[in-house]
């Protein structure tokens, strides 16, 4: 029977996503699916995007109260693009039969 430890696989395959916002460096190592869902729905509402963004990076909504809305949208777009690229790379290697435990 095929068996795989998905927790170990994601740690080996998907690198953290790093970016700087308002002079502070962030490193995302886990992506709660609820946060990803809500952040894309919130890009038209500044109060919602702050909360969703804070949830996504593990911060506090108040930390982004003075952050330019456009910066939050740009950061959210960067994160979503990075996630999409990592998944596409993983799927491509997996389909081609390569060792998927190598960094994407």
Image: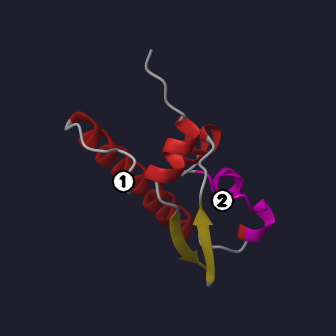
Q: Residues within 10 Å of mark 2 (few under 14, many from 20)?
A: some
Name the spot of residue 48 as percent of width and height, x first.
68, 50
Taking the view exactly as shown, the residue that stands out farthest to the top is: 1
Taking the view exactly as shown, the residue that stands out farthest to the left is: 96
- Up the image or down, 87 lies above or below 29; here it is above
Q: Quadrant of the C terminus?
A: bottom left
- Up the image or down, 15 lies above or below 34; here it is below
> In the image, which residues are magenta?
45-63
Name the spot of residue 3 as percent of width and height, x first.
48, 24
Secondary element type, mark 1: loop
Name the spot of residue 74 as percent of width and height, x first.
47, 65
Nearer to us: label 2 or label 1: 1
- Which residue is at the front of the view, 91 or 69? 91
Q: Which residue is mark 2?
A: 57
| Tag 2 and tag 1, C-beta contact below 8 Å | no
Q: CA distance from mark 2 to mark 1?
A: 25 Å
What's the residue at 39%, 55% (across, down)?
Answer: 81
Secondary element type, mark 2: helix
What's the residue at 54%, 34% (across, down)?
Answer: 5
Q: Which residue is mark 1?
A: 102
Taking the view exactly as shown, the residue that stands out farthest to the front is: 1
**Magenta-drawn stretch, dominant element (helix, strand or loop):** helix
Q: Is residue 80 left or right of residue 38?
A: left
- Which residue is at the front of the view, 60 or 94? 94
């Amino acid at each position: 029977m095929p068996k795989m430890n998905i927790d170990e696989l994601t740690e080996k395959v998907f690198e953290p996503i790093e970016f700087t916002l308002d002079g502070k460096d962030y490193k995302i190592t886990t992506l709660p699916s609820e946060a990803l869902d809500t952040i894309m729905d919130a890009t038209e509402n500044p109060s919602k995007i702050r909360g969703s963004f804070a949830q996504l990076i593990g911060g506090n909504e108040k930390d982004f109260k003075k952050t330019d809305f456009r910066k939050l949208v740009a950061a959210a777009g960067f994160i979503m693009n990075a996630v999409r690229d990592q998944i596409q790379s993983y799927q491509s290697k997996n389909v081609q039969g390569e060792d998927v435990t190598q960094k994407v």
